């Protein structure tokens, strides 16, 4: 899964020019800077899409930030043999739908 880092907390949906970035799974981290001071930063899973994309395109972009088409086919075909992986896939699929539904567009 792709992850981005930022010095400040990010909004879930950010549009810059012709790019929509969707952030989720925020994690807070700390580290020491060059002077020995503790600084906080954040990491996020993310997907890129177009601000004009509809629901289906957003779900697809989010899904493919973690799974390739081949990954998805394998998970579906092997769900009986790997039920935990298939359950994780379905949970992520629901998250993708929820995130896509949450975007109000331009």
Image (spheres, rainbow, N blue to C red):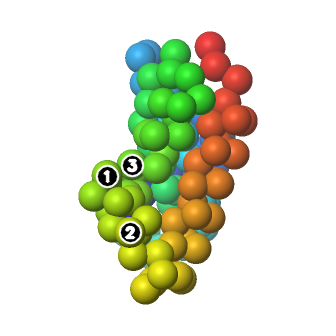
Q: Which residue is mark 1?
A: 69
**Mark 3 or mark 1: whose residue is earlier in sequence:** 3
Question: Where is residue 91 shown, x and y percent of the image?
Answer: 62, 64
Q: Secondary structure at mark 1?
A: helix
Separation of marks 3 and 1 at Cα, in angstroms = 8 Å
Judge from the rendering whether residue 44 lies leftward or rightward of residue 81; answer left or right. Answer: right
Q: Earlier in the sequence, mark 2 or mark 3?
A: 3
Query: Residue at coordinates 52% horizontally, 56% vertically from top-left?
Result: 44
Rendered-image quadrant of the C terminus = top right
The quadrant holding residue 35 is: bottom left
Residue at point 72%, 36% (across, down): 102
Quadrant of res 3 = bottom left
Q: Nearer the viewer, mark 3 or mark 1?
A: 1
Nearest to the eye among marks 1 and 2: give it: 2
| Residue 94 visible in the picture | yes
The residue at 49%/56% (across/down) is 45
**Residue 38 x/y as whole percent:** 54, 72
Q: Say above or below: 66 vs 78.
A: above
Which mark's residue is nearer the viewer, 2 or 3?
2
Q: How much space separates mark 2 and mark 3, taking CA atoms? A: 18 Å
Indicate whether 8 appears above or below 18: below
* Residue holding disc 2: 77
Q: Which mark is residue 64?
A: 3
Res. 29 visible in picture: no
């Amino acid at each position: 899964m792709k992850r981005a880092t930022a010095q400040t907390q990010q909004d879930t949906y950010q549009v810059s020019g012709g790019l929509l970035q969707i952030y989720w799974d925020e994690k807070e981290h700390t580290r020491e800077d060059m002077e020995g001071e503790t600084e906080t930063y954040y990491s996020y899973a993310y997907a890129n899409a177009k601000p004009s994309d509809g629901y289906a395109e957003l779900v697809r972009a989010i899904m493919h930030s973690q799974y390739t088409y081949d990954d998805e086919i394998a998970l579906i075909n092997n769900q009986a043999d790997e039920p935990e992986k298939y359950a994780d896939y379905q949970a992520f699929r629901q998250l993708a739908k929820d995130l896509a539904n949450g975007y109000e567009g331009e």
